[in-house]
Image: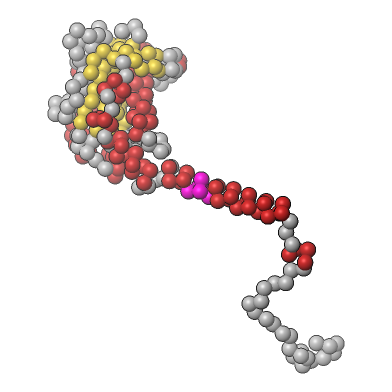
């Protein structure tokens, strides 16, 4: 529009769509170095995207393919892994004792693999019933001084991931892992340090309901001399600083929790579980 003119009175501007932009010549040319740099960036970008996708697959949620595969693998371990690998003759427990003292446990008895009939007290049997019982494996260990005995149990259930999640939530919500009437039973064996390890000798225990495997891991500890325990205490309470009960003073909470944790960790490693979530 010329100065003083009327808008729209001049020649309309010409507008063109779909034409490529005409860059000045300096930008139109690319050196060999620029082409190589662009190619490198493309490769790196593709690799980062691919890595991110792979990482997301490996650490996917409870319904992702990686977790589902690991869940299924864990459920088959009871008949695919030799007993000496599931229950090693010796278990190292670095920092597992009171004051982060090291522990070494030696296996003294392995129970025949079986179902769950008669393996738990009635109330614990009822609490575990929703997930079923595929197989129960147990072994008993003693510490380096043979003063304590601890039975470790691996209950392979018939449940899917949703069933294990539901049971884990119930145990957490109702604190079932801390109830004295829901203690697991020990496994005693003749001619071993655990020969007198019966229901009345239970001193401390730990139960973990896994959500990334169809397994309930537990451990129950007591004295090897067969003494009766009047006030058993869950491992978490017996491990608290300043706890004065007999199981706490003897470190039996550390025995139960230390062994349960190591078997839980080993099971996850064998199954290739992508993530460890609280259980």
Query: Which residue is outermost to the left?
Result: 117
Q: Specify the quadrant that holds the N terminus.
A: bottom right
Q: Residue at x 76, y 90 (%)?
A: 11
Image position, residue 30 (x, y; %):
72, 59
Q: Residue 43: percent from the left, percent from the top? A: 58, 50
- Residue 39 or residue 12, whichever sits in front: 39
Q: How many callouts does the rendering have?
A: 0
Q: Which residues are magenta?
A: 49-53
At 30% from the left and 24% from the top, the residue drawn is 86
Give the colour scheme shown.
secondary structure
Residue in the picture at 41% in, 38% down: 275
Q: Quadrant of the C terminus?
A: top left
Q: Is residue 46 visible?
A: yes
Q: Quadrant of residue 126?
A: top left
Residue 162 coordinates in the image, percent (x, y): 29, 44
In this rendered view, identify the residue nearer to me: 253 or 31: 31
What predominant SS class does the magenta segment belong to? helix
In the drawing, does residue 27 fall left or right of residue 175?
right
Q: Does the magenta run of residues contain 220? A: no
Residue 211 seen in the current view: no
**107 in relation to 73, above or below:** above
Residue 190: x and y, percent? 17, 10
Q: Quadrant of residue 149?
A: top left
Q: Give the image quarter of residue 3.
A: bottom right
Which residue: 18% across, 22% down?
112
Q: Is residue 27 above or below residue 126?
A: below
Q: Nearer the viewer, residue 114 or 46?
A: 46
Q: Residue furthest front?
A: 32
């Amino acid at each position: 529009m010329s100065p003083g003119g009327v808008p729209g009175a001049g020649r309309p501007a010409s507008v063109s769509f779909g034409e490529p932009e005409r860059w000045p010549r300096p930008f139109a040319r690319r050196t060999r170095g620029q082409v190589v740099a662009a190619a490198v960036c493309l490769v790196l970008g593709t690799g980062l995207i691919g890595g991110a996708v792979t990482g997301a697959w490996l650490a996917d949620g409870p319904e992702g393919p990686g977790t589902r595969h690991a869940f299924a693998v864990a459920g088959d371990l009871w008949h695919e892994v030799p007993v000496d690998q599931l229950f090693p003759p010796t278990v190292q427990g670095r920092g597992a004792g009171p004051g982060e003292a090291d522990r070494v446990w030696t296996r003294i008895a392995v129970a025949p693999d079986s179902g769950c009939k008669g393996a738990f007290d009635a109330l614990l049997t009822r609490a575990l019933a929703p997930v079923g019982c595929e197989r129960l494996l147990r072994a008993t260990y003693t510490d380096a001084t043979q003063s304590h005995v601890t039975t470790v149990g691996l209950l392979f259930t018939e449940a899917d991931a949703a069933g294990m999640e539901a049971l884990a939530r119930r145990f957490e919500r109702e604190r079932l892992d801390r109830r004295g009437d829901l203690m697991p039973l020990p496994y005693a064996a003749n001619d071993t340090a655990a020969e007198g390890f019966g229901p009345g000798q239970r001193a401390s225990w730990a139960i973990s309901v896994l959500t990334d495997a169809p397994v309930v891991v537990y451990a129950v500890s007591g004295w090897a001399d067969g003494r009766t325990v009047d006030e058993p205490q869950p491992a978490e309470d017996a491990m608290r600083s300043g706890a004065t009960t007999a199981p706490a003073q003897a470190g039996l909470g550390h025995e139960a929790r230390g062994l349960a944790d190591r078997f839980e960790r080993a099971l996850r490693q064998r199954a290739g579980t992508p993530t460890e979530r609280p259980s």
